[in-house]
Amino acid sequence: MEPILTIQGLKKQYSAGTWGLNGIDLTVQPGEFIAVIGPSGAGKSTLLRCMNRLIEPTEGRITFLGEDVVCANKRELRSIRARMGMIFQHYNLVYRSSVLENVLHGRLGYMGSLAGMLGRYPEADKEEAIALLEKVGLENEVYKRADELSGGQKQRVGVCRALAQKPSLILADEPIASLDPKSSKTVMDAIHTNCREQGIACLVNLHQVDYAKAYATRIVGIKAGRVVFDGPSDQLTSDITQYLYEGKEDEMFHKAAI
Ligand SMILES: Nc1ncnc2c1ncn2[C@@H]1O[C@H](COP(=O)(O)OP(=O)(O)OP(=O)(O)O)[C@@H](O)[C@H]1O
Ligand SMILES: [Mg+2]
């Protein structure tokens, strides 16, 4: 199968002595569900954000659906980003807008700028957005303002917004780091079920090794900007985990549970 994403020799230098990434090679197949784990400062966010160039890579190649991401111009990048959904730790919703409008924002990458600015979404987009919200249990929240929701509900809106893009790949940067265990499970289930059903590949950064093992079929372990493990979840031994989190063992567990 043709990979949807290929990363070769990816490096990111923030300043003279600070390297966020030290040469990452990674290939993602369509529909794969991959957890990226590693201690704080390992480079997980830098890696995810280089993929859609929220952060500019210093060196290396990224190919997404046959297109060169690093060399893409503004128009090409917009089209690439439309096919890469993103889920953020702090949700990044527009809080004075309704839940429905927030989900519809996922459609903006496919609309003309005037229609987008005026919020003129096709009726079919609205129906699909509502169906997505129903599927994650937010049928009673559709017309509420986003700031009226709990953290777990806000993140489910974030998930629906990413899904509304009909992406080939979802990038999720610590989507459950701010949530309690019950909400974490609801959010991870929403991401996992939808990705699997729709054949969307997913790269999810997680601190919690237990969640990574529970949901991902493949785990990528990052330490000091390098991949130190890449394999099926059941091959992640406690020795590898220990090496990965050396001196930072307290980060392996769910933050809310500590
Ligand atoms: N904007 C920035 N300017 C300078 N250095 C940065 C910047 N962002 C990240 N770094 C550095 O790059 C390295 C990787 O950071 P990154 O945020 O990618 O790690 P992370 O694995 O996502 O950590 P966390 O688990 O805490 O979110 C760290 O050493 C960090 O200090
Ligand atoms: Mg991070």
Image (cartoon, rainbow, N blue to C red):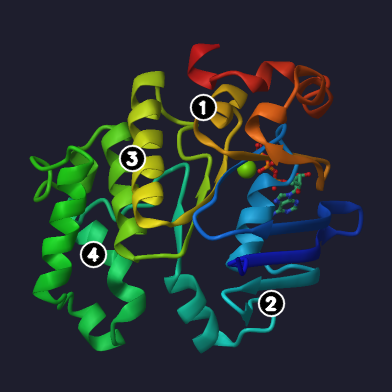
What number of labels is visible?
4
- Amino acid type indicated by mark 1: Ala
Q: How crowded is mark 2: few (under 14 residues within 10 Å), some or many (20 or more)?
A: many
Drawn side of residue 82 relative to residue 41, left or right: left
Image coordinates for residue 184, horizontal then vertical, percent: 40, 28
Mark 3 and mark 4: span between their CA atoms? Answer: 18 Å
- Marks 3/4 in contact by CB < 8 Å: the verdict is no
Q: For mark 3, what is the residue?
A: 190
- Amino acid type indicated by mark 4: Leu
Q: Quadrant of ligand 2?
A: top right
Mark 2 and mark 3: span between their CA atoms? Answer: 31 Å
Can residue 121 be seen here?
yes
Q: For mark 1, what is the residue?
A: 214
- Amino acid type indicated by mark 2: Val
User: Residue at left 58%, top 26%?
Assistant: 208
Mark 4 and mark 2: span between their CA atoms? Answer: 28 Å
**For the residues carrying marks 1 and 3, which lies nearer the camera in this image?**
1
Upstream in sequence: badge 2 or badge 3: 2
